[in-house]
Image (cartoon, rainbow, N blue to C red):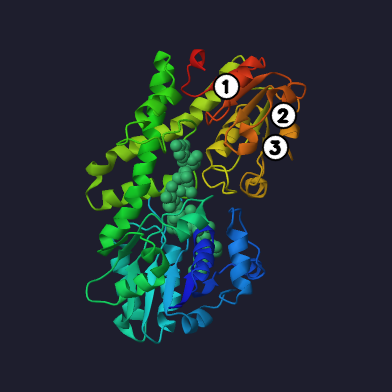
Amino acid sequence: MAIRMTVFGTGYLGATHAACMAERGHEVLGVDVDAEKAERLKAGDVPFYEPGLPEVLKRNIEAGRLRFTTSYEEAAEFGDVHFIGVGTPQRRGEYAADLKYVHSVIDTLGPLLKRPALIAGKSTVPVGTATELAERVARLSPVGDQVELAWNPEFLREGFAVKDTLEPDRIVAGVQPGGKAEAILREVYAKAVDAGTPFLVMDYATAELVKVSANAFLATKISFINAMAEMCEAVGGDVTLLADAIGHDTRIGRRFLNAGLGFGGGCLPKDIRAFMARAGELGADQALTFLREVDNINMRRRGRMVEIATEALGGTLIGKNVAVLGAAFKPDSDDVRDSPALNVAGMLQLKGAAVSVYDPKAMENSRKMFPTLGYSESVVDACEKADIVLVLTEWQEFRELDPAELEGVVRGRVVADGRNCLDARKWIDAGWNYRALGRNLSTV
Ligand SMILES: NC(=O)C1=CN([C@@H]2O[C@H](COP(=O)(O)OP(=O)(O)OC[C@H]3O[C@@H](n4cnc5c(N)ncnc54)[C@H](O)[C@@H]3O)[C@@H](O)[C@H]2O)C=CC1
Ligand SMILES: O=C(O)[C@H]1O[C@H](OP(=O)(O)OP(=O)(O)OC[C@H]2O[C@@H](n3ccc(=O)[nH]c3=O)[C@H](O)[C@@H]2O)[C@H](O)[C@@H](O)[C@@H]1O
């Protein structure tokens, strides 16, 4: 059965969710306070890079199932289910999450809800938020607790957002006992549930914790392998061989064991910090002190990359030209929030290098966020007279680079592979000084 639903916040999460819910046959209205974003989406233009999303968006707008607005009145009138997908960034100067956008949705929407409805939270929030929001909305809505609240966290990855939304690994429904929320969410996700996706029903607190603990686990896995990379560097081991070898153990698994510059983005870093902050508030911080080290290991890899570049250039970056290939926090995304690549580029510049950054999709966002860095329009432009080439985001275009083609472009044949994504043997055989994190080059 088609459900009339709204999605508040049409960023990476919200725009994808709105388009995919329409793809599943529902009638969807996306709502954003950013009028320019709403206009672009209305015109079928996705304001960020996400493979496959433009097609789903256009198809569903044309089919009349998907619209966008900035009007809360229109949204309250239209929807029976209201998803919250607004941002929950790290508070400035603190670890805790800033809930002001979530509160703004509830405080504006609540009084407008004059008939029974379900609000389903998808944003990542500190444990305890859903209970507070349920009380808040019951107080604000003219129909009181006939507006129910569910917590329905999202697990999509940027770059695979459409697939992850249409075919999720699991659906988590945090609900209060005795309400209609579970039945409504089963209807919302009927196609996925019918196809066998596990639908997991639990209390609010557990649902909120599932989300942050999943991200904390992923972050821990990455920092674990990066700690092993530090060990490999200390003793002459090779972390890529180590990851393959431990990854063969099916209890460990090879995924998320790619050592390199570590994790960035709009989620993993802020989510582990918000998790630590909330644990502290609850007096449970002992249980999560290791996350501080997960964060520290992660940040150390960025500094190590700068050291490697400096060592390779004879101990100083002053007067050196540095090509930085990659700006997005990972390939197949234009997202530069907490990007390790741009962080490293900024540190290199501070140490006196003339930096030139190129990324296939993230140039516009990079220029906006880091206007003082140098930028180029292509790999070749960035590498022009470079003393070192750093590959900091593993775009396919960079993996496939031909060292022979860059030979006549650069000033020095030095390459630093921050993502262990290049064919080291190819670069070494072409006469390049190849540097990487946690590698033993005698084994390549
Ligand atoms: N980006 C991702 O891959 C995933 C994000 N999440 C979580 O989803 C949430 C949103 O993340 P993103 O989409 O990345 O953020 P984003 O920053 O790309 O998008 C947030 C959107 O909310 C809009 N907004 C702000 N206040 C609003 C209001 N009062 N009413 C309506 N719209 C409003 C903003 O204009 C913006 O378009 C965060 O809690 C994040 O942790 C969860 C899973 C995946
Ligand atoms: O809560 C969220 O927003 C999302 O956060 C992550 O998704 P995402 O941030 O899109 O990116 P990931 O693919 O998890 O990568 C995160 C970072 O880790 C790095 N990474 C990943 C894997 C790896 O082996 N090594 C590694 O350094 C990536 O380069 C990237 O910087 C989670 O994977 C999603 O499940 C979750 O929904």
Q: Which residue is drawn at 51% across and 78% down?
A: 72
Which numbered circle lies on residue 424?
A: 1
Q: Is mark 1 on a helix, strand or loop?
A: helix
In the figure, 375 relative to 368: above or below? Answer: above
Mark 1 sits near ligand 2, with its Cβ under 8 Å away: no
The residue under label 2 is: 383
In the figure, 31 relative to 244: above or below? Answer: below
The residue under label 3 is: 374
Mark 2 sits near ligand 2, with its Cβ under 8 Å away: no
In the figure, 206 relative to 332: above or below? Answer: below
Q: Is residue 132 visible?
A: yes
**Residue extending furthest front?**
195
Q: Position of residue 315 (x, y in %)?
A: 59, 16
> Which quarter of the rendering shows the N terminus?
bottom left
Mark whose residue sits in front, 1 or 2: 1
In the figure, 196 relative to 292: above or below? Answer: below
Q: How crowded is mark 1: few (under 14 residues within 10 Å), some or many (20 or more)?
A: many
Q: What element carries label 2?
A: helix
Q: Is residue 93 visible?
A: no
Rounded to the nearest whole Å, what is the CA distance between mark 1 and mark 2? 18 Å
Q: Where is residue 254 in the image (x, y as percent from the top left)?
A: 40, 35
Q: Which is more N-terminal, label 1 or label 3?
A: 3
Q: Which residue is drawn at 40% across and 71% down?
A: 188
Q: Residues within 10 Å of mark 3 (few under 14, many from 20)?
A: some
**Residue extending furthest right?**
408
Mark whose residue sits in front, 3 or 1: 1
The residue type indicated by label 2 comes to Cys
